[in-house]
Every structure is written in C-alpha cells, then in structure tokens.
Image (cartoon, rainbow, N blue to C red):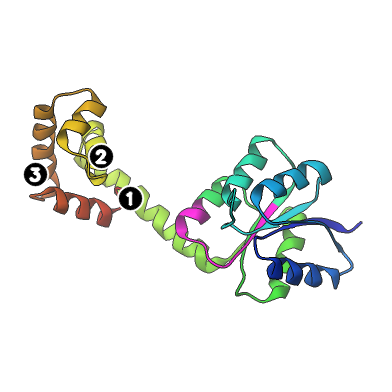
C-alpha cells in the first residue's frame, strides 16, 4: 500500500516540484496539496495521511504551530519539515513536539524520499548540522541555568529576565508585586554576584551566558 502524503508549502513552484518527485516513486501517493498550516490541518483531519510534509515558515499558521495542533488532537500523521532554513530554537521545539524528520530544501531530493520512508517506518530523520547546533545551544542553556541557580535566587533570575526586556524598575516592581526600592536592592546584589556595574552589562552577560 502506498505511503499517503499531504504536501504543504506557500510556494506553488515548491509544491509542483515535490509532487513530481513523489510521482516518480511507486511507493508514494500524494493525496493533497496545501498552501498554509490551516489547510494542512483540515487535510490531515479529513484524509488521515501517513506523512505531512510542510515548511516551517508559512503564512496563516507556521509549521511548528501546525505540528503542535496535530499533537494536541492526537492525530497519528507523522510530520516531516522540509524547509529552507531552521534555527536552533525551532529544532529544539520540533524535537519536543515529536517531529518525524527535518530536511533542508538545499539537500538532494533523494534524501527527502529516504527521510519519508524512514519516518513512515517509525524512525526519526534529522538534518545533522541543524541538530548539532541545536544540541550545543540547549546544553549551553542548561549549563547557564545551573550556573545561574548557583549564583542568584529565583526572584533575582526573574528580575534579570525583566531587565532584559528593557523594563524600568517601577514596572518590574509592579509585575512582581514588590516595591521599586526592593528592586534596587536586588539589582545591587545581582550586579555584585555577576560582576557587572550597569543594566547594559547585566543584559550582555546574561545573553552571553545563555540566561536569557
């Protein structure tokens, strides 16, 4: 029985190319073409394909939100992202949501065919350069979180993240339900612990260490 596929991309030329690619292989059958995430969800609900191939960056609803919705509805269709570019945060989120595969559009078409076959067989296919970058970033974040926890309190961590949003002390105080004076005391303590002397330095250090 052919592997039933729904294609989703907001560029018609990409859809045409993908449809021709899968038409050359006897073990695939394209059952729908979609131009956005909402159309993709409707097609999956109605046609129950084995695989949904979609771009991460699409109008109306992006690929990650589409994958998130599929998981919330516990639909069995497996998802393969076929995308021009993907950043580390998107890869981390896609893995968390249980993506079946990630293939960059710059890669050889036969790798997409190979990916879909493996994902249909229950395996996971991830483009290694993106995954390596994502894992490196995730490990850095986890290390930074542990370091931050050893240096500052939970309340001080909240304040660092609000400072990074360029909020004034008064607004930070209002959000946390404490006085502006208390915020000043916390900031003084944070500056000493992280060896900085200004808000700008604090944000730079927090970004460098992966706190925010």
**Quadrant assignment, res 14:** bottom right
Based on the picture, tell me whether residue 85 belongs to the magenta stretch: yes
Q: Is residue 103 above or below residue 62?
A: below
Residue shown at the point (70%, 74%) measured from the top left:
109
**Which residues lie in the magenta part?**
79-92
Q: Nearer the viewer, mark 1 or mark 3?
A: 3
Q: Is residue 4 above or below residue 160?
A: below
Q: Position of residue 148 (x, y in %)?
A: 25, 43
Mark seen at residue 101: none
The residue indicated by pointer 3 is: 192
Q: CA distance from mark 2 to mark 3?
A: 18 Å
Q: Position of residue 27 (x, y in %)?
A: 87, 64
Mark seen at residue 143: 1
**Quadrant assignment, res 104:** bottom right
Mark before the other along the chain sequence, 2 or 3: 2
Local crowd size for mark 1, using a 10 Å CA cut-off: few (<14), some (14–19), many (≥20): some
Q: Position of residue 7 (x, y in %)?
A: 74, 58
Dot 1 lies on which element? helix
Dot 3 lies on which element? helix
Mark before the other along the chain sequence, 2 or 1: 1
Contact, CB < 8 Å: mark 2 with mark 1? no
1 left or right, relative to 140: right
The residue indicated by pointer 2 is: 162
Q: Nearer the viewer, mark 2 or mark 3?
A: 2
| In front of the other: 143 or 161 | 161
Q: Position of residue 111 (x, y in %)?
A: 69, 71
């Amino acid at each position: 029985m052919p592997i039933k596929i729904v294609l989703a991309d907001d560029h018609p030329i990409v859809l045409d190319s993908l449809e021709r690619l899968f038409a050359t292989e006897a073990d695939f059958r394209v059952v729908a073409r979609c131009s956005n995430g909402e159309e993709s969800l409707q097609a999956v609900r109605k046609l129950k394909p084995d695989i949904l191939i979609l771009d991460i960056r699409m109008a109306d609803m992006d690929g990650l939100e589409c994958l998130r919705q599929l998981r919330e509805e516990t639909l069995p269709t497996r998802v393969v992202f076929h995308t021009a570019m993907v950043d580390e945060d998107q890869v981390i989120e896609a893995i968390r949501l249980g993506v079946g595969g990630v293939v960059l559009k710059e890669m050889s078409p036969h790798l997409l065919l190979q990916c879909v076959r493996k994902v249909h067989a229950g395996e996971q296919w991830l483009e290694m350069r993106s995954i390596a970058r994502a894992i490196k970033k995730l490990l850095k974040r986890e290390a930074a979180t542990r370091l931050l926890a050893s240096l500052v309190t939970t309340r001080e961590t909240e304040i660092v993240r609000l400072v990074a949003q360029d909020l004034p002390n008064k607004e930070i105080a209002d959000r946390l339900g404490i006085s502006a004076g208390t915020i000043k005391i916390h900031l003084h303590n944070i500056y000493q612990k992280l060896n900085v002397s200004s808000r700008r330095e604090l944000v730079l250090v927090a970004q460098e260490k992966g706190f925010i």
